Image (tube, helix red, strand yellow):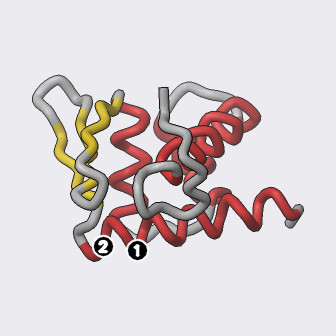
């Protein structure tokens, strides 16, 4: 595993912990999209169906990027390379939420 993947897996671990302890909460909306609420940072982010799928998998305890990528490829019509890049970017964006691993002050756009 390369160094970058270790850092991403560490971010996933922190996000899973925050989801499981209730600091981050997510809700599925009727149209298949969702929202995630950062209670500590008082932020709300909208999620498309793919983002919601990833959040739900992490909330169920999935802690490794490789597994998230594999599950995303199985669920959606996407290549492994595309899924890898999308999952990593999604995790980086979420990790910038208040209190998250790797918080550097940037906010997801």
* Residue placed most toward the observer, 32 or 46: 46
Looking at the picture, does residue 78 appear above or below residue 92? above
Which residue is the site of mark 1?
17
Looking at the picture, does residue 32 appear above or below residue 27? above
The image shows residue 80 at horizontal and vertical percentages of: 71, 37
Residue at point 62% right, 34% down? Answer: 86
* Residue placed most toward the observer, 105 or 55: 105
Residue at point 23% right, 49% down? Answer: 42
Q: Quadrant of the N terminus?
A: bottom right
Q: Residue 20's mark?
A: 2
Task: Determine contact: label 1, label 2, CB under 8 Å.
Answer: yes
Looking at the picture, does residue 41 appear above or below residue 14? above
The image shows residue 8 at horizontal and vertical percentages of: 67, 59
Decide: few, some or many residues near mark 2? Use Cα within 10 Å; few <14, some 14-19, many ≥20. Answer: some
Residue at point 61% right, 27% down? Answer: 78
Residue at point 38% right, 44% down? Answer: 53
SS at mark 2 in the image:
helix
Question: Which residue of the protein is positioned furthest toward the left in this rendering?
Answer: 30
Question: Which residue of the protein is positioned furthest toward the right in this rendering?
Answer: 2
């Amino acid at each position: 595993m390369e160094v970058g993947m270790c850092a991403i897996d560490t971010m996933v671990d922190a996000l899973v912990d925050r989801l499981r302890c209730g600091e981050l909460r997510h809700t599925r909306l009727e149209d298949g999209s969702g929202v995630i609420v950062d209670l500590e940072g008082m932020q709300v982010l909208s999620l498309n169906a793919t983002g919601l799928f990833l959040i739900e998998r992490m909330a169920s305890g999935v802690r490794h990027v490789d597994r998230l990528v594999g599950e995303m490829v199985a669920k959606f019509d996407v290549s492994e390379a595309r899924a890898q890049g999308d999952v990593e970017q999604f995790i980086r964006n979420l990790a910038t939420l208040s209190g998250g691993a790797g918080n550097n002050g940037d906010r997801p756009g």
